[in-house]
Amino acid sequence: MHHQVLTNDSSSHGPTDSRVEFVCRPQRAAEARDAIAAFLERLDPPPRSDTVQNLLLLVSELVTNAIRHAGGVSSLRFAADRRALQIRVSDRSSAHPQDRTPDLTGRTGGFGWPMIRRLAHDVQVRSREGGGKVVVATIGR
C-alpha cells in the first residue's frame, strides 16, 4: 500500500496550528488499521488510549463500508492538530450511507453506520465534484 505523509507546521502561529496529514489507498480494513496506527505513532503528544481504540474501530468500519457498498476506497486521509483527529474516506459511489435495521444474525450487517455516528464527534458526507463522495469523521484528541 502506497502512502504519503504531509506535514504543515505553522510554528509561527503557535502549536495549535500544527497539522499532520497522511494519505493512502487501502484495499482491506486491516491495511487501514495499520495505516492509522502508523499515523498515530508520529503524533506528539499521542492521543489517549481510548481515542486510539475508537479511531481503529472508526477507520475499520469506514473502509469496510466503502469496500462493501462503494466498490473500494479512492483515498484514505488522516489529519491531526492539537484539538482533533480526522478520518476522510473517499470512494466512487455517490450513494450516501443509509440507516437500516441491524441484522442480529450477523449475515447482512447494519451495525457499522450507527457505530460510526456514535464514536465520532462529527460525521459529514460530502458529494465530490465529478462523482463519488467523501465521509469525514472527526474525534476529539
Image (tube, grey):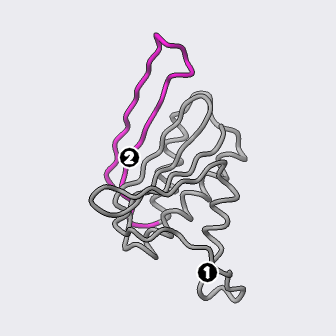
Residue 83 disc label: none
Who's the residue at 46% across and 76% down the image? 68
Mark 2 in CB contact with mark 1 (< 8 angstroms): no
Residue at 48% x, 29% y: name it: 19
Residue closer to the observer: 15 or 37: 15
SS class of the residue under badge 1? loop
26 in magenta: yes
The residue to which callout 2 is attached is 23
* Residues shaded magenta: 1-28
Kind of residue at badge 1: Gly
Q: Position of residue 76 (x, y in %)?
A: 41, 53
Question: Residue 122: percent from the left, percent from the top?
Answer: 62, 49
Q: How far separated are the C-alphas under marks 2 and 1?
A: 28 Å
Q: Position of residue 83 (x, y in %)?
A: 62, 31
* Residue to which mark 1 is pinned: 109
Q: Exactly how many numbered labels are in the figure?
A: 2
Check disc 1: other Cα within 10 Å, few if <14, some if 14-19, many if 20+: few
Q: Residues within 10 Å of mark 2 (few under 14, many from 20)?
A: some
Q: Earlier in the sequence, mark 2 or mark 1?
A: 2
